[in-house]
Image (cartoon, rainbow, N blue to C red):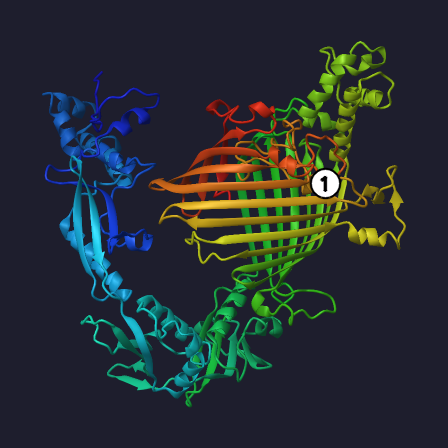
Amino acid sequence: MISMRIPLPVIKCSPKIGLLLIATIIPSCNSLKRVGENEVLITKNTILTNGDKMVDEAIESLIIQKPNTTLLGYPMRLNLYNLAKVNPDSSFNSWLYKKKNRKQHLVNLLSEKQVNRLGESFVVKGLSEWLKKIGEPPSTLDTLLTEKTLERLSAYYRSKGYFNNNTSFKIDSLNKKQRIALDYEIKLGQPFIIDSVFHKIPSKAIDSIYKLVKAKSYVKTGQQFDIENFNKERERLTSIFRNNGVWNFQESAISYNVISDTTKLGDDPMMDIELNIDNLKKRSENSITTSAYKVFKFDRINIYTDYLFDANGGQLKFERFGDYTIFYRDKLRFKPETLTDAVFFSKDSVYRDLDRIRTYRQISSLNVFKYPSISFVEDSTNTNLTANIYLSERPKYSFSTNLDVTQSNIQTVGLAFSPSLQARNIFKGAENLSLSGRLNVGSSRDPTIIDNRFFNILEFGGDLNLDFPRIWLPFINTKKIIPNYMLPRTRATLGANFQQNIGLDKETFNAVLGYNWTPSEFKKNAVELLNVQFVRNVNSNRFFNVYRNTFDKLDAIADNFETVPSLSGSYDPDGNLTIPSGTTDFIDAILNRTVTSTPEQYIDVFRIKERQIRLTEDNLIFANNYTFNKNNRKGPTDNNFYQFRFKFESAGNLLSALSYIVPFDKNADNNLLIFDVPYSQYVKTEFDYVKYWNTSKANVLAFRSFFGIAVPYGNSDNIPFVRSFFAGGSNDNRAWRPYSLGPGRTNAINDFNEANLKIALSLEYRFPIVGSFKGALFADAGNIWNVLDNVDDPEATFKGLGSLKDIALGTGFGIRYDFTYFVLRGDLGFKTYNPAEENSKRWFRDYNFGHSVLQIGINYPF
């Protein structure tokens, strides 16, 4: 046997003693390890304008040489880079030939080729390359790059009107070995001011439009010269011209001339600006011709429903519908109105770029065509346009399947199969019908499940969904209220879901008729005119098997009654209540007062019985709701925005009104019944606000606030479980697990704690660590309470502003990995203020790793 030692990168760091390898090695590394003898490390950059320190990320981004990045003040990426070997190949060769027969032994054991590959392996070479990739080389001073930075800074301030600025730099040695700070000094001088603005526009059409809109120009007399205002004005004018008939206007036609001499500094440096808008330039093979811009109107609008047909040859048929001509092959498979409603051009209307964009959006949203193509052709008069809209159909039917392996707190392993079938344009009005199913089989170790098979739990269901591109209301024309450019849609859904050996074996049926429309890319509206949900608990006798915390509390009370003769049959040999007969007999004995109990015991048993009834009774929810969303985010990379969501829901009012006309049955509590089930009646509202601040190029501060309340009335004295609020979890207060916080200052007395009032606040600071790894520091505050319902526990109910002292606080940190399309997130939360503890022990009682909570999530929590 031949023993080998492969050389790894040598870490030349001063030794330290610690608990973790990273904590002992990396912090002690020498930041100057890769800094040459005649080089200096840049640790700080400062920009000074007229002697004043400038703090502006946009200006700081002009600096070419930046200090090495730090994590909480520590240059981690620099030290990772320093861990890599400079020349791993030579280190391997030195080791290989250090002993006379080492290479020959390796060749005998492996082969010549494998020994060579060993030198190129990840252990020898790849690790160093990886450390260099995720690390960061030392930022050393290069005066040539410093001079280029001065040129950038000078050009920037010239663009702001300081044409005679002077720049220089100064090196501060900081009295530290081979470390410096750079000061970039700019003397601005006097800014140039716009004295007057002239314009030169040969096109009469452009000139007339410009005169109507020049009052709102970004370039105005008396302003300091700023190139940004000129760029904004070019964009503004281009948009105006292209939305007022000049379909072929080119932004490059707009230019500005500075009439004043900016090379000389006077006591009052004023400048005159001339706006030039040239004629249209057309390039041919041998020459460039110019012509005046003109306003165009639509003369013909053609819609081709078989875009690829011409490639196969043949003659198209056509049909005229209003101002439109629709071309098709063999048979027109769409209602003409469906096609023309998606087009925002009309005969004799002036061309608008906005109508072109809306046409693209509307056709794409139909989900029956591939991305459309639109072209425009001028006629011989150069005043009329023909619009040609080319469409290519998606397949009539599409089928897809998903197979997943799952794991959860109720199953050790599970298999999920989800098939889906979609049929497009089923009624020739771009209506899309989808049928989706789901089947999940799992293995559970729950001892209360009698089924001994490996896959002993089952869940299956399906949904039928029909959506079409308009607001459907009988006998009501909604086009004037919600025009087509708002992308109106109607959605009708039927669904069912069944469970076996899962919880109480729920059977759920739902039906939804909803509408949504989007007035702009920043606003969305959704209305569910009808949202019906029926929940049937098939196996309610399993309540105490499923809700173990509730059973443990009842069983603890029952321990005091084991010697009562009338209850002797309610216990098993171990002295625990049997389920369900023993629990039922004991509760009945306490509530019917056939045995003597203390007032506290009676109240506790009464509350347990009340919760059992609430969670095991069938639910019928007949609701309608409205949701409004607004945000000002300009794109996925915009990290300086807000978003707001408001939702209002009402349930049971229609049925309550019908009860005055149609006599409904009643139960013992005088509640009205539909199919022997009391329907729910409540109002519910939610407010959700999120705000992002871009504190630097890569660092973000994010804030979220949420308030929700649901109030039962009429036919209900509580809110259905599926419509209640809960606290804790990866997207809520991360120091508590889902359903384990609250209500109020109770200490998670139930298995699934929920209530009808919720307040939540979160603040999170996000920053890069290395490569695709990101970090976060967060604080989550909030809780849930019962209010205006049938819960009378003073520790769980909201009594006013004094109850705000029961708001829980969790803090912690997180590590995230950005996969570009999604983010994998791990957050570690610590209970900082726990309202369930005694007043004197609420702060930092369990603030340690032993009581921390690890939350795993996909994407950011808000």
Q: Quadrant of the N terminus?
A: top left
Q: Amino acid at mark 1?
A: Pro
Q: Tell whether 592 sits left or right of 43.
A: right
Judge by depth and name the residue closer to the eye, 743 or 476: 743
Residue 538 visible (yes or no): no
Residue 812 visible (yes or no): yes
Label 1 sits on residue: 720
As drawn, which residue projects farthest toward the top?
A: 563
Residue at 69% in and 36% down: 799
Q: Tell whether 453 sits left or right of 611.
A: left
Judge whether 522 appears above or below 497 on screen. below
Judge by depth and name the residue closer to the eye, 460 or 398: 460
As drawn, which residue projects farthest toward the bottom?
A: 381
Where residue 99 appears, as percent x and y from the top left, is 11, 20
Judge whether 652 appears above or below 30 on screen. below
Task: Give the quadrant of residue 73.
Answer: top left
Where residue 620 appears, as percent x and y from the top left, is 76, 44
The number of discs equals 1
Task: Give the quadrant of residue 468.
Answer: bottom right
Residue at 61% in and 33% down: 806
As drawn, which residue projects farthest toward the right?
A: 663
As drawn, which residue projects farthest toward the front?
A: 267
Where residue 621 appears, as percent x and y from the top left, is 74, 46
Q: Tell whether 59 sits left or right of 688.
A: left
Residue at 52% in and 34% down: 734
Q: Tell whether 724 sits left or right of 849.
A: right
Judge whether 594 appears above or below 287 on screen. above
Residue at 53% in and 72% down: 305
Q: Secondary structure at mark 1?
A: loop
Crowd tier of the residue under label 1, counting other residues whose Cα lies within 10 Å: few below 14, some 14–19, many 20 or above: many
Where residue 44 appears, as percent x and y from the top left, is 24, 43
